[in-house]
Image (spheres, rainbow, N blue to C red):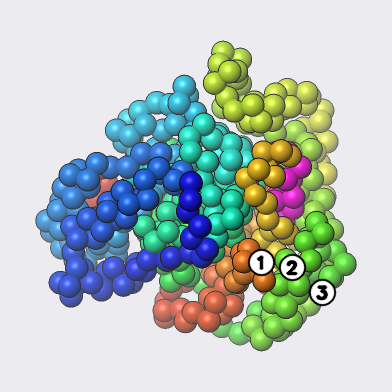
Amino acid sequence: MGYEVGAPAIGPSVEEILASHASGTGSPTKTALRVADSIAARGDDGTWLSTVPREDLLAAAADVENRPGARTLPLYGVPFGVKDSIDVEGVPTTLSCPDYAYTATATAPAVQRLLDAGALYVGKTNLDQFATGLNGTRTPYTVPRSVYGNELISGGSSSGSALAVALGQVPFAVATDTAGSGRVPAALNGVVGYKPSRGLISTVGLVPACKSLDCISLMAGCIDDVDRVRAVMVGRDDDDPWSRDAGPGYTGGRIRIGLPPVDELEFFGDDEMRSAHLAFRARVERFGDVVEMSLAPFLAAGELLYQGPWVAERLVEFADFLAEHPDSIHPVVRDILRSGEKYSAKDAFAALQRLQELKAEVGRLWQRMDALVVPTIGTTFTVDEVQARPIECNTMLGHYTHFGNLLDLLGVAVPLGTTPSGRPYSATILAAACTDDIALHLAAAVLDEPRRTGAGIAAVPSPSPSTVEESV
């Protein structure tokens, strides 16, 4: 495709866009025009599966400008993208499978909150089909590449969401993260990937991959953008049986940071990635009190995801389509779905019991630490390498992410730079459920990014009925 960008080109932040709109130097309409021009200039690079037509986007921006009290809206005219497994009313939801596509009749509550806050919906972003994969190559559409070039994979499944931010087209994008889908592409494109505690953001209107593990996540250029957007999106939804309230905000004090023993870390023979991560680890003590913490129970839980019966949970949503339209499914995704058919109820209960044992073990570790820092990915791959070894490469990409939702953790993937060969590396800050603000505070410190006073949220009320009538 010829796009050897070499680095992310993060655009204006949410704060900068809001400031320009407030001062009059910019406006939602001007911002919409910039976004439309930027997307058009790239052409079909695998980032977007559909976008709002230019005239309609400008009209939507004008509508935002004309709302009563528009300039007080927390996301006044801020553009964003949505992963194409999440519903937006009147827009096809494809999951990167044309024969599966349907036109949504309602907007997912998480997206509706953004619209109510004045944000400007731009379009649907690409993904690994059925949100099954961490590499970005499992799509019948254009296969995206990392902004770092050299045919590096974009990561997935939220490939387009990461790219839309890394290319500077939108300051944030809505993604998902069931097994690392929001952290791996963030790492491969040099952006922040925030996987909140499960249940903080409603998953109503998300086509489930594994419903008991699914989590709507965010891609952004900085922690402040994450803070501003999550303050809008987080809130209890009684229609979501996994919904729960946010935990307390960060109250100050030293953070206890867990680091695994070096001999427990795996970089799959990638010496550059190993050296880069160890150099970062050497300065972690600047941000808190370091304690050594074994990674063994975390990795043991991760092995249950694709080597256990959770893969069968994908059949709850896709079994009928698999039976009726097998040739419509990407061959690798089809094989993964079929692998779920071999598991029995006995297998499921045995795995649940084993997972509960590991949860108890990990729970005791959180008594000694507030956050655990691990590599986001141990190595990188080209598109050709992944297509030659699709399962093996994908398993390596998920080494540090697969266990996250199984163990009810949250995660923040933080970009750290590049190796001597120009490949991105990233660390993930993991923490126990509902301690999101501690992890985000640590992430901001790592990025040398000051946080606004009161950025943390303890709970966010649902939109009032009078504010939820607007749709795209």
Q: Work out whether residue 247 or residue 153 is closer to the camera in this orientation and state it.
A: 153
Residue 259 numbered tag? none
Q: Are marks 2 and 3 in contact (CB under 8 Å)?
A: no
Q: Residue furthest front?
A: 2
Ranked by sequence position, the earlier of labels 3 and 1 is: 3
Question: What is the crowding at mark 3: few (fewer than 14 residues within 10 Å), some, or many (at least 20)?
Answer: some
Q: Quadrant of residue 291?
A: bottom right
Magenta-tinted stretch: 390-401
Residue beneath disc 2? 272
Residue beneath disc 1? 421
Q: Are marks 1 and 2 in contact (CB under 8 Å)?
A: yes
Ranked by sequence position, the earlier of labels 2 and 3 is: 2
Report how far apart the C-alphas of labels 2 and 3 lie in the structure: 23 Å
Q: Is residue 114 above or below residue 190?
A: above
Q: Nearer the viewer, mark 2 or mark 3?
A: 2
Q: Is residue 174 magenta?
A: no
Q: At numbered mark 2, what does the secondary structure look like: helix, strand or loop?
A: helix
Type of residue at label 2?
A: Glu
Q: Quadrant of residue 128?
A: top right
